[in-house]
Amino acid sequence: MTILDDLKYSKDHEWVRMEANVATIGITDFAQSELGDIVYIEVEAVGEILETGDIFGSVEAVKAVSDLFLPVSGKILEFNEAINDSPDKVNRDPYGEGWIIKVEIETKENVSNLLSAESYKELIGA
């Protein structure tokens, strides 16, 4: 299982990569492995301003459907359209081609509440 040191993580198993004031967000390798083969991802919040913990979409897998919780407050800028046609990218490359959304955040304080890679490893028992 891969957990990248340069990312931040939520207790709901989303990861966050910051580039200036834009957060790229996806689900962790742990989350995708627990869900199994992902068959559909729905995000209807593009253009909306949401708060930390709000549901921004859902992931449908062979095993279950799971809500996606926003790990940082901000405006949803973009949905990764490539995963519409190939949702399995989230299984194959959750930290790369399998990213889900990009969010514009107002303050980096949002990110300070997230877990480090080490803390996330402890959370999942890795």
Image (cartoon, rainbow, N blue to C red):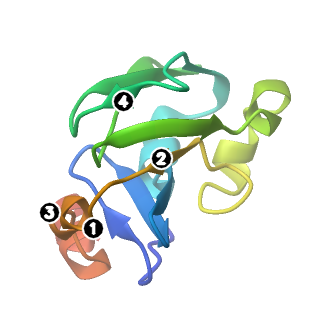
Q: Which residue is mark 4?
A: 49
Q: Is residue 66 above or below residue 25?
A: above
Of callouts 2 and 1, the N-terminal one: 2
The reply, left or right, for residue 1 in relation to residue 37 is left
Label annotation for residue 108:
1
Q: Is residue 98 visible?
A: yes
What amino acid does circle 3 point to?
Asn
Circles 1 and 4: CB atoms closer than 8 Å: no
Q: Front-most of 25 and 50?
A: 50
Q: How many marks?
A: 4
Q: Position of residue 23 (x, y in %)?
A: 47, 58
Of callouts 2 and 3, the N-terminal one: 2
Q: Front-most of 120 and 53?
A: 53
Q: Label 2, label 1: how many angstroms apart (C-alpha)?
A: 12 Å
What amino acid does circle 4 point to?
Ile
Of callouts 3 and 4, the N-terminal one: 4
Check the image and name the residue furthest to the front.
106
Q: Is residue 67 visible?
A: no
Residue pictured at 32% horizontal, 23% vertical: 55
Q: Is residue 58 above or below residue 101?
A: above
Q: Label 3, label 1: how many angstroms apart (C-alpha)?
A: 10 Å
What amino acid does circle 2 point to?
Val
Label annotation for residue 113:
3
